[in-house]
Amino acid sequence: MGRCFASRCAPLALVLSVCLILSSCAPADDVEALFYELDHPDHEVRLEAEERLAQIMRDGRYDSFLRALESDNLLIRANSIVYLGQMPQPDARRALRSLLAVDRRMMLPYNPVQMEPSSEPVDSRVLVATMFQRTEADPEAITTLLEDASVEQEPEAVIGTCLAIGALEDARGVPFLTAATGHTEVDVVRAAIEALGHVGGPEALAALIGMLEHPSRLVRIDVMSALDLRPRSESEDAIRSLGSTDEAPDIRRAAIEKLAHSGGPGIVPYLIERLDDPDSSVRLAVVAGLERATGKALGPDAAAWKAWWSKNESSFNAAL
């Protein structure tokens, strides 16, 4: 599941993968026809369609995009959300917010991170939440999203709610995400972890730390990735724990590589302790980290590193 959340966007002319070509005389508010004309072979027809869509947006005729949400073409529906999401009028924003309700959800073949068609269907509420994040935040959006949401719903719906919370980046969704981390379906847990990585605050951090010993290796990898999105001062202790105690060698190795890449000389004592890791690939990562942090090449000999550190610790700490 690739997911995530980016900067503001200008009106998008999305390329619809369809063969139908309509004439250039579509009514000004028939946005479904206009979306098809964005893919017309005639350049003038495409330009006129773009202008008509822009005029609909300027006029605040948001209901035109709502009608297009009934289209049989799922990419037309996704296109409608994208355009509606860029309309600043209060009524348009309320209409967009209403699409966060559970009973308005649709599965659309559209990637809200890359803003393009996708072979993997995604909950429409994630795209709606992404449009709020890319344009202007709505303090009522999280309320609408969570109003009828429950971790007891079908896993696909819970996943969508989690990812939409992450797109909104609203800490008021953390209780729902925390509850979702206890779900029996690993995909739901992973969606909750991904969303927690995008939500700030101590509650989200506590929820992530609480998952460090989850039995699923994939979940623990996701936890490390989510922690890596947070400031080093918040995440370092948890990543050190993964590097020291996780049962999976690849997770220990990845944690050590992250720490060595950003830890500086202050990570040296920790790395020296990890030279006794039972896995050879982890030990190699430790040695590489020590060499990166100190500029010395003493190999895997823990005694040599300890002796060197005892003589040089003060000068390294002074440089911190």
Image (cartoon, grey):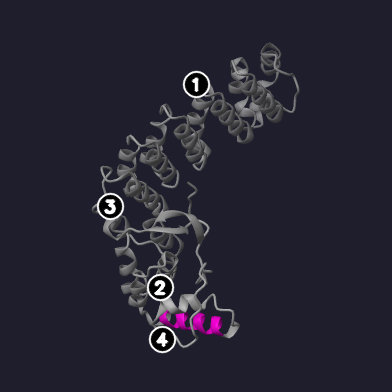
The disc labelled 1 sits on which kind of residue?
Thr
Disc 4 marks a residue whose amino acid type is: Pro
Q: Which residue is mark 2?
A: 87
Mark toward the start of the polypeptide (4 vs 3) = 4
Distance Cα–Cα, label 4 vs label 3: 37 Å
Q: Secondary structure at mark 2?
A: loop
Mark toward the start of the polypeptide (3 vs 1): 3
Q: Earlier in the sequence, mark 1 or mark 2?
A: 2
The residue most toward the left is 148
User: Which three-letter amino acid code belongs to the residue tagged 3?
Assistant: Leu
- Real-space CA distance between mark 1 and mark 4, rounded to the nearest whole angstrom: 65 Å
Q: Check whether the beta carbons of the residues at disc 2 and disc 3 lie within 8 A of each other.
A: no
Q: Is residue 46 magenta?
A: yes
Q: Which residues are magenta?
A: 45-57
Relative to 191, is 211 above or below? Answer: above
Report the disc number at residue 122. none
Return the residue at label 4: 27
Q: Residues within 10 Å of mark 3 (few under 14, many from 20)?
A: some
The tag earlier along the polypeptide, 2 or 3, is 2
What residue does disc 3 label? 146
Say the numbered circle drawn on residue 245: 1
- Near-viewer residue (174 or 215): 215
Spatial CA distance of label 3 from label 1 is 36 Å
Mark sitting earlier along the chain (1/4): 4
Q: In the image, is residue 180 above or below residue 138?
A: above
The residue that appears at 60% across and 21% down in the rendered structure is 269
> Which is closer to the viewer, label 4 or label 3?
4
Which of labels 1 and 4 is toward the front? Answer: 4
**Coordinates of residue 42 in the picture (x, y in percent):** 59, 82
Q: Main secondary structure of the magenta part?
A: helix
**Image x and y of residue 101, in percent:** 28, 58
Q: What type is the residue that disc 2 sits on?
A: Met
